[in-house]
Amino acid sequence: MKQLLFIGSLICVAFLIAGSVWFPNSILMELAGNSLALNIFRGLTIVLLFAVLVTEPPRSVMLRLFMGLSAAGFIFTSLSILFSDSMHFLDILLYAALGCALGIEALEFDESELLPQAATNSASTSTT
């Protein structure tokens, strides 16, 4: 299910980049930003989404830290766009959803590391 969320977000980001490049004056793109800075930010978002999709769930601590910082950045970006009195509604929804999804994904832990510790702790308490 998480993969579907990230693949759908990847498609939405690619659609917003294509729409802002080829159809900047369309009705749909009135709800999204057309600036070069937003397109660069969307491109970096695509790179991050590919990194999340390619790596397997017990991810390294550095990647999880980067995902957590990116999630905070996405939430901050969506709130700053919201409060800057602009009508970039699609960008706000996309970045808020990505921030929440990446934040939850950054909080993952490896269950196999917890199980041997629990077995070791229960064995040591039963022998004493």
Image (cartoon, rainbow, N blue to C red):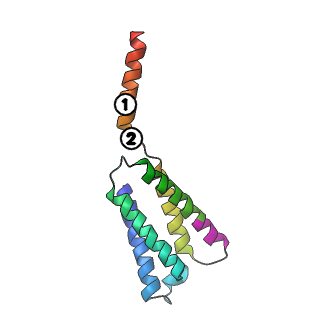
Numbered tag placed on residue 115 in the rendering: 1
| Image position, residue 47 (x, y; %) | 40, 67
Closer to the chain start, of discs 1 and 2, is: 2
Residue found 38% across the figure and 55% down from its top: 2
Q: Compared to 110, does 98 lie above or below?
A: below
Position of residue 5 in the picture relative to residue 89 (left or right): left
Residue under label 2: 110
Split into 4 quadrants, where in the image is the C terminus?
Answer: top left
Please tell me in which quadrant of the rendered image residue 113 appears.
top left
At label 1, the amino acid type is Leu
Position of residue 15 in the picture relative to residue 54 (left or right): right
Residue found 42% across the figure and 72% down from its top: 12
| Image position, residue 82 (x, y; %) | 63, 70
Q: Compared to 95, does 72 lie above or below?
A: above
Mark 2 neighbour density, 10 Å: few (under 14) some (14–19) many (20 or more): few
Front-most of residues 48 and 83? 48
On whether residue 85 falls in the magenta region, the answer is yes
| Image position, residue 101 (x, y; %) | 47, 57
At label 2, the amino acid type is Asp
Residue found 39% across the figure and 66% down from its top: 8
Q: Secondary structure at mark 2?
A: loop
User: Which residues make up the magenta segment?
Assistant: 77-87
- Residue lying at the far bottom of the rendered structure: 25
Please tell me in which quadrant of the rendered image residue 86 appears.
bottom right
Please tell me in which quadrant of the rendered image residue 78 appears.
bottom right
